[in-house]
Amino acid sequence: MNKPNHPANDVVMRASHIAKTYEEGDLKTDVLSDVSFTLKRSETLAIVGASGSGKSTLLHILGGLDTLTRGEVEVDGRNLSSLSDAERGRVRNRSMGFIYQFHHLLPEFTALENVSMPLLIRGVSISEAEREAAALLGRVGLGQRLHHKPSELSGGERQRSAVARALVTRPAVVLGDEPTGNLDETNAAQVYDLMIELNREIGTSFILVTHDNRLAKRMDRTLELHNGSLVEKIHA
């Protein structure tokens, strides 16, 4: 497999004083008030917090999928707020991967085609994209399921395919929003193990929003979102 191609800088992502306020008429709702942290290369980070505390909103802002009211997000040294929509899209494709609670695989395409997609968007040839995708699908235990569509895969297999798709471009950071929230305990444990193993092998950093304390405790650090700000949480 190809080695990741990232700048040598040790900092993958930097969030500085992020604030997010939703406005509807005269009503203003402050979701995030002052969020700052730094993520190093190969580091794994869990973000926990009560339901409705703004965890998913924060993740969307970090991924350039939602706008912020104040503050800055840098990914591989690039300030997302200063980029055009097209430039942010290129940063997402080159530097970030995404895993959600639901796999979001395209139902009409096979596992191989789904995992190849981010490379094809980047402009990689079909043969090279499929070679990389097949290698990674084999790495996640789906080498015999390349030509199966999502409806022909189990829940755990679909989520492992989603993990492969997030990692196929060798991104600097993967953002996961409850990536095992739709799986039973056995499949969730397998996906946990897979993400940690691939983190060590590929060097991709992970930021995972999760309510699962078992997963959070396996991350290098855990930050808790409380009253719009992040605080370091020490593992017991």
Image (cartoon, rainbow, N blue to C red):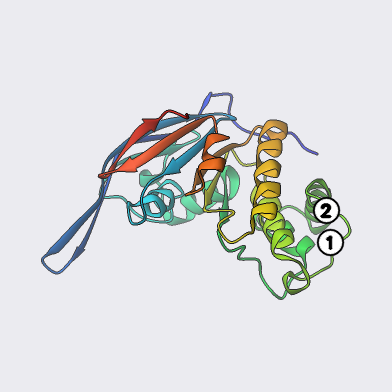
Which mark is drawn over residue 146? 1
Image location (x, y in percent) of residue 92: 53, 49
Residue type at the position of mark 1: Leu
- Give whichever of discs 1 and 2 has the lower sequence position: 2
Which quadrant of the figure has residue 57? bottom left
Which residue sits at x=10%, y=66%? 26
Disc 1: CA contacts within 10 A as few (<14), some (14-19) or many (>=20) = some
Distance between mark 1 and mark 2 Cα atoms: 7 Å
Element type at mark 2: helix
Is 186 left or right of 95, judged from the image as shown?
right
Which quadrant of the figure has residue 66? bottom left
Q: Determine whether label 1 and label 2 are within 8 Å by CB.
A: yes
Which residue sits at x=36%, y=46%? 81
Which residue sits at x=38%, y=46%? 49
162 and 112: which is toward the camera: 162
Residue 74 visible at all: yes
Q: In this figure, which residue is indicated by the disc labeled 2?
A: 134
